[in-house]
Amino acid sequence: MTRFQEAICEKLLLSAAWTSGSIVVFIFAFMLFLGLPLLSGGHFFSLLTAHWAPQQGSYGILPMMAGSLFLALLGLLFSFPLSLGCACFISVLGPAKLRFLLRKVVELMTGIPTVIYGFVGLFLLVPLVRDIFGRGGLSLLSASLMLALLIAPTMILFFCDSFDRVPRSYLDAVDAMGGSKVQKLLYVMLPNSVHGIAAGITIALGRAVGDTLLALMLAGNAIHIPHSCLDSARTLTSHIGLVFSADFESLEFKAIFACGITLYLFTAVLVLVVRGINHRLRRPL
Amino acid sequence: MNRFFEIFFVIWSWLSALCLVGAVAAILGFLCVKGFPALNVELIFGNTEPLSALLLQKQVFDGLFPAIVGTLCLVVLSVLLAVPLGVAAGIYMAEYAVGYVKTCCDFLFDILAGIPSIVIGLFGFTLAVFLHKNFSDQVYPCFLISSISLAFLVLPYIVRSTQISLEEIDPAIRNTALALGASRLQNIIHVLLPRALGGICSGVILAIGRCAEDTAVIMLTGAVAIAGIPRSILGQYEALPFYIFYISSQYADQAELMRGYGASLILIMLCTLLFLVAFLVRKRIAYQAFYKA
């Protein structure tokens, strides 16, 4: 192959990389362009803080932001202890065969479609919640329980990876001093993988906020700021899915670009946080 | 005190493992118990003859056949769009990129992987409206727009799996051909890519799974409840995950709900199958199959 062909191929590969990368910028620019009427009128920031009352001409997305955050944090609250326990089981505590088995189950979970979680949640979990609490079948509680299952594999696999990165010599030192498995885990592995755990939680938070189907199918979609776990709520993501049928030129429709831009920026910030954590991780101690 | 805490921690770990496995078993068990009775030829083909439906001679009205075909077509087109671009970008990132180009692209791919799928769906929808207004009245949210949006969604998976499987190749192997006088590109084509094939393939299979299961994107970009087999890339279409979503909120009677259970069971079997294939491929079967005949 000639030098000329080599150069051509390199340029082709380079352009593929830039094309893929520019899609990210393109998506943002496109939403910004279509949401421009919101920005130019100084509406954008009032949209973020106002309530949703279409009759009075107020299209604020504050209730949806509250709903998204409430749901994601509640899901994380259920999921984190579970995930940490499972990750510890897989990495250290369980018997060898069960560890392998649980790991395979967790990997299988990453392949289960979100819509299946929603479907089963709707016909299995929602009646259960309604029976136990008397109300609130379609509520933040049902949605967040299913969400906890959805984001658990992300966290578990991430935690396991960060446990695996603890230097071998540290673990040998504990073994040499006669420490038990659980002591090794609690006093050496956990303190040494705090960064990895933080990164895992951040990524899971991103997934929780970005999830649409569970919120749409299980959270009930009422537009108000939720006050308890049994309240129904609407998230930014399900709002985008729902307002869809409205007239394209209306301000009501334009408000979903505010939702889209907010979600985009939020996930971008989370990516920055994870990168910051990983950067500190790579720095020698 | 510490002693108690240690014991508590062990018990907690066992409990969470049990809890997780229990939850997954409950989900799968529930679907199997409810879905198996619905699983038969009629579920897929309705009242139409299976053979004539498969040969596209007759339309299937009350079966899942159009939804399954829609999902398959969607997966094929999206992956065809995403794989060449993604693999090329991944090769560049692993083998050529240095300095600020690498940092910059790395960051962009991280963001792309993090964007919620509904935002990509919103982008696809506005793209369709934009094209409709400015270029052609023929363009509506349609099959093509869905495929492009889904391709954007899975692009980072393919880029990352290509990049990682190239980067983790042993430096000794990486430098051998170069030392023998091969050029950089020859080294990539004849040495590195065959080695990385398993990783790349399992990335592609994961991307297929992601395309098959995603509902948020297609919900906004042209999937509808009843459309028949997709006839043109500018037409609307049915898809399995959207059908499940639609049934869950709009079912009229028990029979439709049963069809929803059946559809869920089919989708989950499809995704589990893809997962198993990805698992086998990662064990270097791809390399053996393609290069060591």
Image: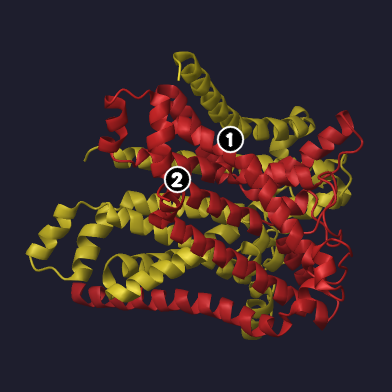
Q: Is residue A268 visible?
A: no
Q: Secondary structure at mark 1?
A: helix
- In this rendering, position of residue A8 left or right of residue B33: left
What amino acid is at disc 1?
Answer: Leu
Label 2 – label 1 distance at C-alpha: 16 Å
Where is B129 relative to A61, above or below?
A: above
Residue at 63% over, 33% down: A23
Label 1 lies in what chain? B
Judge the density around disc 1: few (<14), some (14-19), many (≥20) Cα neighbours within 10 Å. many
Q: Earlier in the sequence, mark 2 or mark 1?
A: 1
Tag shown at residue B197: 2
Could you tell me which quadrant the N terminus of chain B lies in?
bottom left
Judge the density around disc 2: few (<14), some (14-19), many (≥20) Cα neighbours within 10 Å. many
Which chain is represented by red in the image?
A: B
**Residue A192: % across, % down:** 25, 53
Which of the 4 image quarters holds residue A68?
Answer: bottom right
What amino acid is at disc 2?
Answer: Leu
Q: Secondary structure at mark 2?
A: helix
